[in-house]
Image: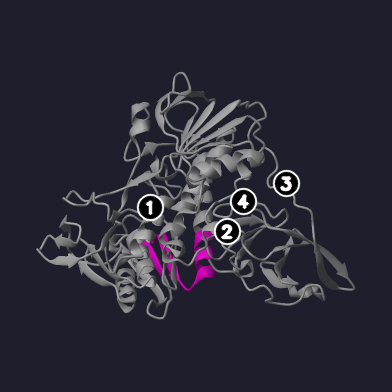
Amino acid sequence: MSSAPASAGPDLTRGIGASEIPEDGVLGGHVGDDPVVLARVEGALVAVSGACTHYSGPLKEGLKVGGTLRCPWHHACFDLVTGAALEAPALAPLDRWKVEVKDGKVFVHEKLAPADALEPMAAGAPKSVVLKSVVIVGGGGAGFACAQRLRDLGYEGALTLLSADAHAPYDRPNLSKDYLAGEADPAWMPLKHDAFYPDHRIDLRLSTTVERIDTAARRVTLGDGTALDYDALLLAMGAEPNRPHAPGFDRDNVFVLRSWADSDALIEAAKGARAVAVVGASFIGLEAAAAMRTRGLDVCVIAPESLPLETKLGAEVGRFLQGLHETHGVRFHLGRSVSAFDGETLTLDDATTIAADLVVLGFGVKPRLDLARAAGLKIDGGVLVDACFRTSAPGVFAAGDIARFPNPAGGAPIRVEHWVAAERQGQIAAANILGAQAPIHEPAFFWSAHYDVSIRYVGHAEHWDRTEIDGDLAAQSATVRYLKGETVLAAATIGRDLEALRIGQAMRDANDRRMARATAAGV
């Protein structure tokens, strides 16, 4: 995790000319060691912390739209007036600062008291909605974000968060990135401190499984036989890593990367290892490869495709990523699959053998649908939900990796396996649990880190007609657009954070226009 420079820009305690603050952007400065950004919102001057509360991204380099500001690194969205974290991945508000104007100069000296994160029922839920109990199944990004947002929106009833994990909700993307590489303090991992849950009256139950759901009785039965009644239920069970259908991949030195315990087990095993084989050139697989190289291990990657991530990012980005990893010493066996592992040697489908002290599996996941299927919910490659994340059963919602939802850009329903998407879906579900009619309009977003290179991806493209590349991938300054006809379905950027934000905003605006037309047409 990086930090924004503390003292970049002017010292705002000494004052700046009011004309230096742009109408359509922000001005970054500092008060002592604290970065601060100044902005204009509806004619008034406001000041908030200049470091994103997610990974301390430099908000002075972000995108201002109206009274909101988006972080350039991971696209968290904040309210410039209240400091509220409106959209994940940021889960905490920005500090607000007092702005004074004297003799045409603007000064910032002191912090203001925190504002309410969100006005109760700000999402437009009718006051008549009364819920006594909400149960959330799943302690990942979607489940946690839903629980937090319910309290932020003023929900006062019982709130139970059930997690099969032994750890309280944590920062899952880091499991294959800095944490796995040994460059992230374990203290950074929890999404909130332990006191957050009792302070917000969230009944967090860890190492807890759900046996069945009775949608008619609105009851959840746990693995120990305990029954919980609910008025509203969110299902957010996530996904399960795939394993090869070949012998030997259930051995103790074969690892997946889904939980904190998984990452810790791999880190411990890596201490006594020399050679690592990564099966799968997925985002997780390549990030794990980079982390293992950072730890000094020999790494090879085996995958059936001809280029890494070609079906996700296209051939050009695939070649760039392969070259990047090869520059760092990773060896690739592409166009190959694994046929066996005896604990020391990996055998490929062409009889090639590779010595490996440990194996990391990184070739996709499958959504955990058994519980939803047994409950009688409609399933089609995921739990089918509407744009408000309501399932086919009254009072039951689904979000995250298991949810198949209407694409806000139009077309067939989609399922998205990204952390930020899961968190935002949980936030949207929370508003709709409370009675709002708040359909998803955000384009999907994720980031992937490989050594010192980060890829930002906005939108969703399963298939495209062509790609357009602006810039130079080799120089690590490029934008790749994925088009169907003349429509940009998605874009990936390297070294162009502000452009990624602008593309995302253009997609958001287009989604809003499409939804407005559909509403006007009565669709």
Instruction: Assess whether mark 4 and mark 2 are in contact (beta carbons under 8 angstroms).
Output: no
**Neighbour class for label 2 at 10 Å: few (<14), some, many (≥20)?**
many
The residue at which mark 1 appears reads as 262
Q: CA distance from mark 1 to mark 2?
A: 23 Å
Determine whether, in the image, residue 119 is placed left or right of residue 523: right
Judge depth for marks 2 and 4 and give the one in front: 2
Front-lying residue, 157 or 435 = 157
**Neighbour class for label 1 at 10 Å: few (<14), some, many (≥20)?**
few
Which residue occupies 69% across, 55% down? 83
User: In which quadrant of the rendered view does residue 56 lie?
Assistant: bottom right
Q: Amino acid at mark 2?
A: His
Percent from the top left, x then y, of residue 65?
63, 60
Q: Residue 54: which numbered mark, if any?
A: 2
Tell me if residue 444 can be seen: no
Percent from the top left, x then y, of residue 458?
45, 59
Judge depth for marks 2 and 3 and give the one in front: 2
- Farthest-out residue, left: 351
Q: Is residue 229 above or below residue 350?
A: above
Q: Amino acid at mark 4?
A: Leu
Q: CA distance from mark 1 to mark 4?
A: 31 Å
Residue 381 forms part of the magenta stretch:
no
